[in-house]
Image: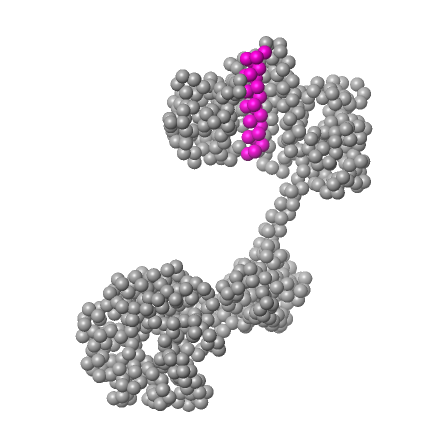
Amino acid sequence: MVGAPPLVALSGIALSVALALLVLLVAISRDKSRRRADRMAGLYYALSQVNQAIVRMDEDRELFPLVCRMAVDYGGMAMAWIGQLEPQSGDILPVASHGEGEDALQRVTASSLPDRKEGQGPTGTALRENRAVIVNDFMRETGAIHWHKEVRRLGWRAAAVFPLLRNGQPFAVFSVYHRRPGAFDDEAINLLREMSADISFALDNFDREEQRRAYEQALAESEARLSTILDNVGACIYLKDTDGCYTYVNQEVLDLWGVTRDEVIGRDDTPFFDARSVARLRANDERVLRRGQIVQAEETHTVKVTGKTHIYWSVKLPLRNAHGDIYALCGISTDVTEKKTSQQRLHYLSNYDELTGLPNRAMLQERARLALAQAKAADRPVALLYIDLDRFKLVNDSLGHGAGDRMIKEFSRRLTAFLHLDVTLSRAGGDEFYLLLPGMERDAVLNIAGQVLEMIARPVAIDGQQLTLSASIGAAFYPEHGGNLEELVQCADTALAQAKSKGRHRIEIFTDLMRARARKTLLVESELRDALEQGQLLLHYQPQVDMGDGRVTGLEALIRWQHPQQGLILPGQFIPVAEESSLIVDIGTWVLKAAAQQQALWQAEGATLVPMAVNLSVVQLYRDDFGGMVEATLKENGLSPGALELEITEGVAMEHSAYILATLGQLQALGVRLVIDDFGTGYSSLSYLKRFPVYKLKIDKSFVDGLADSAEDQAIVTAIIGMARGLGFTTVAEGVETREQWEFLRDHGCDEYQGYYFSKPGCRRRHRLSLLRGSQGGSANNVAPRSRMNAVISR
C-alpha cells in the first residue's frame, strides 16, 4: 500500500504500534536512570496487556489474576493483589494476587471499617474514601502499624492502592508493593490509576453487556484510553509519511506549536520551524525513511508561531507494512529545555558563587590543579592569597545581611575589574576570598596584594552611608610552602591569622615559624581542654586599692593554669588560644562560677565582701541567655549583684550588635556593674560610654608603664582621669609597680590602683600573707590595715 494510512484508520493500527510507541518512551528518557526507564516501560506494557485482556475476557475472575501478574512481571512490583469488599463484615478479602509474599495475605487482614486497626491502613482508606492512597515510605505509615512486621520481613518500602469501582461504588481495591522507597512518582501513579480505571470500566462492562458487545466496547474504550495516554503523555508524538508530511500529532504538539490539528495534518515542517531547524529535522527524518535507521538525537527547534526555542530529545523509527516496506515515520520528542537549563544552572552553582559570580572552591581546586601542573613543568612559582575583610560582622549586625551582601558584591566587582584574566579570584564564603596567581614572582605578588588592600579600603556607599573596611591577607607560595591547593590554603590561612593578630590591614607571608606556632597552638588547645576537665585551672586574686586611704575596694579574679609539667602558666599564654576556639565559653563560665563560689565561701566565713571583678569575652556575651546564667550563679551562691563586677574590653564595647546591647541591658537590670578594661587602647570613639551602664574605667598597663619617663603616656593618663571625672566614672590604674607611678597617679586624681606595688595576685591563703606584708617600697599610705585585709580576704 502506497502512502500513509488516513487518520481515521489510526484505531486499526493503534494496537499494532502501541508496543513500539511504548518502547520509544523508554528511549526518550535515556538520560534518566535505567531502572526507572525499564520500570515505566514495563508499566506501559502491563497497561497495554490489561487493556487487551479487557477486550477478550468476560469476567473478573479471569481479569484479576492477569492484572496482578502484569503488575509484577512487567511493572517491576514485588507483589500485587486485588481485594474485594465483603459487605456484611466490612473485611477486604483477597481474590487475586501475584508475586513474593502472597502468603502474607493469609496472616494479615484488611478492613474498610475506620474504627478497626485493620481499617486504618492504605487498603481500607482507599476503599472507604474512594481515592488512591500512595505510601512512598511504608515504614513511616503509622496507620498500617499491624503490617510493619510483614513489611520488614518482605523488604517492601512503598505501596500504592487504588479503588476499583463497580456501578459507581467502591467494589474492590488494587494494591501494589515495591521494594524501593519513592517508587511511585507522578507518571507511575497516573499509569496505575489508568489501569485501575480500565479495570473498573471492565467490571461495569461485565455487568451491563453480553460477551460480543463487551468485546466491542472494551476495544473501543481501550483505543480511547490509548489516545488519552498519547495526548497526555507529556511528549510530542507524531507520524509522518514518506514525504515527511504529518499524518498524526498528539495534543502536546498542537499546544506547543499553537496550531490546530487541521493546520498540521498533510504538511511538512516548513510552516512551523525556522529554516535551519527544518534542515536538521529533514536530515534526521531521511535517515529513518530512506535508510530504515532508528535515530536518537538532541534537536533544537525554534517555533515560528511563538518564536521560542526548545531543546528536544527525539527518538524516531520506521514503521513497516506486512511486506517490510517503510510507509511511515513514528517519532516521540520530549522537551528537555527546562532540564537542560537546570543542568546548566546546577553546573553554575557547582562551580561559581551565586552571590558574586566568582569561582567557588570547587572551581578553584580545578584551576589550581592545572596551574600547579603547568608550574611544575615550567619550574615557575604559584602564589595563593587568602583575603579576609576585617570586622565585616559589624556591617551585618548594624545594617543587615542585605547591606553586607552588597558590600561583598562591590568588592568582588572592584577586584575582578582590576585583576588579569590569568589569575583566579574565588569566594571562599562569607567575607573570605582566595586569589590564585600563577607564574608570578614574590615582589609582583606583594605588589598586587598591596593594591588589593588599597582597593578594598576605598569607601563604599551602602544605604546612603559611606562605609570603609580594611582587609588582611595571608600569602603562601608553591613550591616553597606546599605542592597542592590544600597545603597552600593551610599555609595561607596560618599567615592570615598572623596578619589579624598583628592589627589587621596587612599582608603576612607564611613562614616555618608560623607553622611551628600553629602546631603549638593546637597542642595548647588540646592540653587546655584536658586542663578544664581535670581541674588544673585556678584563680588568683589581685586587690584594687583606694589611692587615698589604702582601703581594698575590690578584687580582680585572674585565671592561672597549673600545668603538670610546665608549672604555673599565665593567661597571656593560653587565653588567646581559648578565644580562637569554643573553649573560651566554657573557661569563662568556669571563672565566673569559681569566683562566685569563692565570694560565697568568704561570706560564709564572716568576711565583709568587696566586689569581685571577672573579665568577659565577646563570645560569652553572644551565648544564649548569658544574663540568665549570671543571675542563676548569684542566686546559687547567695550573693547580691553588687558582689560581682564584669569587665569588658573596648573591643566588646564597640560591638554594635543588638544582641550584645540587650544582654548588657539585662545585666544592668539585674544590678551587676560593668567596667571598661584596658581603656584607651585602639579606639577613638567614646559614644559607647553613653550606651552602657559603665561606672569604672581601668587605665591600661601600657600607659602606666611609661609614667616615669614618657611625657606622652603622662598626657594620656592625665586626659583619661580628667575625662572620667567629668563623666562621673571611677578610674583604676592597672599594673602599678613603682612608687613613681603610684605618686603620679595619686597626684593627678586617679581613684584606685592595682599592681605589684601593692600586691602580686595570689590564691586565697597565700594572697593573705602578701597583702599583710604590703609591697616592697610601699608606704603606710598604700598598705591596707591588717584588720581590714583580714576582713576582705580571710577570717
The quarter of the picture where residue 288 lies is top right
Q: Percent x, y for residue 675?
A: 37, 74
The quarter of the picture where residue 467 lies is bottom right
Magenta-drawn segment:
185-209
> Is 624 placed left or right of 785 in the picture?
right
Say above or below: 506 vs 106: below
Of 384 and 184, which appears nearest the observer?
A: 184
Quadrant for the N terminus in the image = top right
Say above or below: 325 vs 309: above
> Is 608 placed left or right of 715 in the picture?
left
User: Colour mode?
Assistant: one colour
Of 608 and 100, which appears nearest the observer?
A: 608
Q: Is residue 205 magenta?
A: yes
Of 786 and 101, which appears nearest the observer?
A: 786
Residue 214 is at least partly visible in this image: yes
Q: Is residue 218 magenta?
A: no
Query: What residue is at 59 percent from the left and 9 percent from the top?
Result: 210
Say above or below: 182 vs 377: above
The quarter of the picture where residue 15 lies is top right
Say above or below: 229 vs 769: above
Residue 530 is at least partly visible in this image: no
